[in-house]
Image: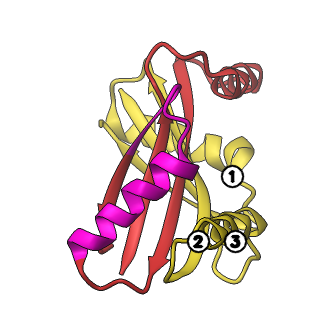
Chain colours: A yellow, B red
Amino acid sequence: MKARVEITLKQGVLDPQGKAIANALEQMGFAGVAGVRQGKVIEIELAETDARRAEESVRSMCERLLANRVIEDYTVELGI
Amino acid sequence: MKARVEITLKQGVLDPQGKAIANALEQMGFAGVAGVRQGKVIEIELAETDARRAEESVRSMCERLLANRVIEDYTVELGI
């Protein structure tokens, strides 16, 4: 079973990487860029075939390793 | 209008970051992790309101700055 985790900075947390992209786009002549936020996407291939147990396992991975819960949120999608 | 760009490594391109995550998960006791791939997600807030022109603009941003087309693929979603 495949799981897809998306990790994004919480609202209000400064995103210097996004800001750098926005500045670069502006300098390259792209007008009208009001804001840029960057996040991560992690695709995990699991041996587990039970969806509920797979989701539990992936959420535990997020809490313990993948996401920094102080500044980041995450979403988990299964079976894609 | 909001655009969402997802940038992933092309199939066959080595992903050391994904490999490091897979190793860390295994060492933490998560069994059955067959593979991990990491990508980026970039959310862009645009002043443009016309969907076709917004998509054209974002694709151009991807080709010129956001994605390395030699090793990366990208997808663009609009209006989310």
Q: Amino acid at mark 1?
A: Ala
Asked if badge 1 and badge 3 are on a common chain, one would say: yes
Q: Which secondary structure is most common in the magenta stretch?
A: helix
Q: Is residue A25 above or below residue B16?
A: below
Label 2: state its secondary structure: strand
Q: Quadrant of residue B52?
A: bottom left
Residue at 57% across, 51% down:
B65
Alpha-carbon span between mark 1 and mark 3: 26 Å
Q: Position of residue B80 (x, y in %)?
A: 33, 73
Q: What's the chain of the residue with tag 1?
A: A
Q: Is residue A30 above or below residue A5?
A: below
Q: What's the chain of the residue with tag 3?
A: A
Location of mark 3 (residue):
A23
Q: Position of residue B3 (x, y in %)?
A: 39, 68
Check disc 2: other Cα within 10 Å, few if <14, some if 14-19, many if 20+: many
Q: Amino acid at mark 3?
A: Asn
Q: Nearer the viewer, residue B23 or A48?
A: B23
Location of mark 2 (residue):
A36
Where does the magenta region start and end? B51-74
Q: Position of residue B38 (x, y in %)?
A: 58, 35
